[in-house]
Image (cartoon, rainbow, N blue to C red):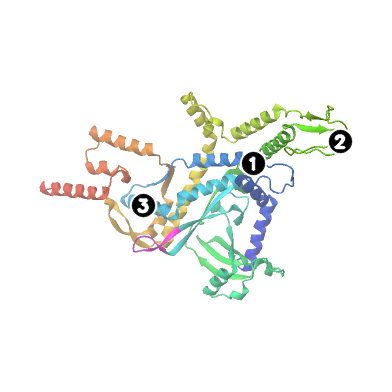
Amino acid sequence: MRTDPAGVWAEYQKGVSYNEGIGLYEQVRVNENFYVGRQWEGLYAPDLDKPVINVLKRVVSYFISMIVADDVSVSFTPFQQDAGAEQACRVLSGETARVIEQTGLKDLSRDVIRNAAVDGDGCLYFYFDPNAETGGPARGRVCAELIDNTDVHFGAPGVQDVQKQPYLIIASRRHIDAVRREARENGFDETEILPDGAREGDRPEDDMVTVLVKLWREEGTVRGVKTVASGLLRDVWDTGYRLYPLAWMPWDKVRHSFHGQAALTAVIPNQIAINQLFAMGIRSVKMNAFPKILYDKSRIARWSNRVGEAIGVVGSPSEQAIAANFRGGDMSAQVVQLIELLTQRTLEFMGASDAALGNVRPDNTSAIIATQKASAMPLELQRMEFYRFTEECVRVIVDMMAAHYGVRPAAMENGKTGLFDFGALRQVNLSTRVDIGSAAYYSELMQIETLDNLFQKGIITDAVTYLEGIPDQYVRGKSRILEKLREKQAGLAAGAGI
């Protein structure tokens, strides 16, 4: 495993060559331009209007809203039912919810889906900030950062599973002053850090430098090294992780490549055709819709359309047929029909029909709902992929908590706070099922309704058991109520001599 700056840079260049070979950089640039509306970039046509009928952005917005329409919930279930494992799962649930809230993971998830649909892949990189405030006596928390798919390079490009990679390289562009300061703080010679342009003997175009973080597994844990092309920023260190701190989501998987296919790539020609037809239609209307005046130049030297201006003629002004009106032919109706057909078919084949987008009259609501559900079915594959991505994020978060948290306060049994050794989570992470699914409002109400029915029918007779099953957000001060109920039960048991 190469850890020297030259070796890491050579592996990075190998990854860049692979991306260039599959046309990733150019495809991402084109897709981004079409998504944000820069759909005429590079075309020189000064006399042609350049309308943008951005069908693609609306479809991507629909994809994002459909996949994250419901909040995502995480639940932990131990494979072996014992008190220790159940307690660890309760701690995991509370601390994972805290990390998801503090990192803004729900907001980042929307950006991940957006990047996957537009660029082909979405990626989150996790790291630990030891100085971050947590709201309690302990310091340090897990953080997440959104990364472009063009900045991640896998050691085995044909393997799609992140955790099966021999190594990962994450690239970033940073200002040279900050990079030199980091090198100096880590005990390295800051004068070796040069801008990317100066490294090749050319005049540097800017003061930016490419920083590479290489991760690989060795002796069961993930090791890392941080370099630039000309020197080290941080020598090899043991992260203590067993999983790569990276979660990866392709939109459509491509065989023998870790890069996915974006939703926009295949339909960009449709978008170009729609814009071109609109542009030529506008040109035709502007050229032919308004009448033109034809005049006899032998009798009128110059024609002016200014109001009230005199026009000189040769001969008698009373003679007729000095000028005549002319109007060009109308544009064929097939142009408008073709534009509508292209737009409709593009939306349908992308899974965003008029019924799904709400562009129908609500005459038959039952039929509309059924059509919307059927239109959303193709997105179930991406929804399942998003759930897998979220589970991968949760696994990484638990692995990082086990490596960094140590012994710190956590929510224990009965709603009380106590010290918990997070190092024990490493084994729990391997022996626990993580379930990712929709946390819709109606499902929580269904849970409460089910508990009410069980309690009324006498199947559940204990008030503590009943209250423990109700979601926390529906009962204010739930932990205090449970504590009082348990004290009351303990007092009744002591009075009865039990």
Relative image position of residue 52 (x, y in whole percent):
64, 41
Q: Amino acid at mark 2?
A: Lys
Magenta region, residue range: 132-142
Quadrant holding the N terminus: bottom right
Q: Amino acid at mark 1?
A: Val
Give the Cα distance between marks 3 and 2: 89 Å
Give the Cα distance between marks 2 and 1: 42 Å
Q: Nearer the viewer, residue 207 or 226?
A: 207
Relative image position of residue 223 (x, y in whole percent):
53, 63
Dot 3: element: helix
Decide: few, some or many residues near mark 2? Use Cα within 10 Å; few <14, some 14-19, many ≥20.
Answer: few
**Picture layout, residue 355 above or below residue 84:** above
Residue at numbered disc 2: 297
Q: Which mark is residue 100?
A: none
CB atoms at circles 3 and 1 under 8 Å apart? Answer: no
Q: Which mark is residue 94?
A: 3
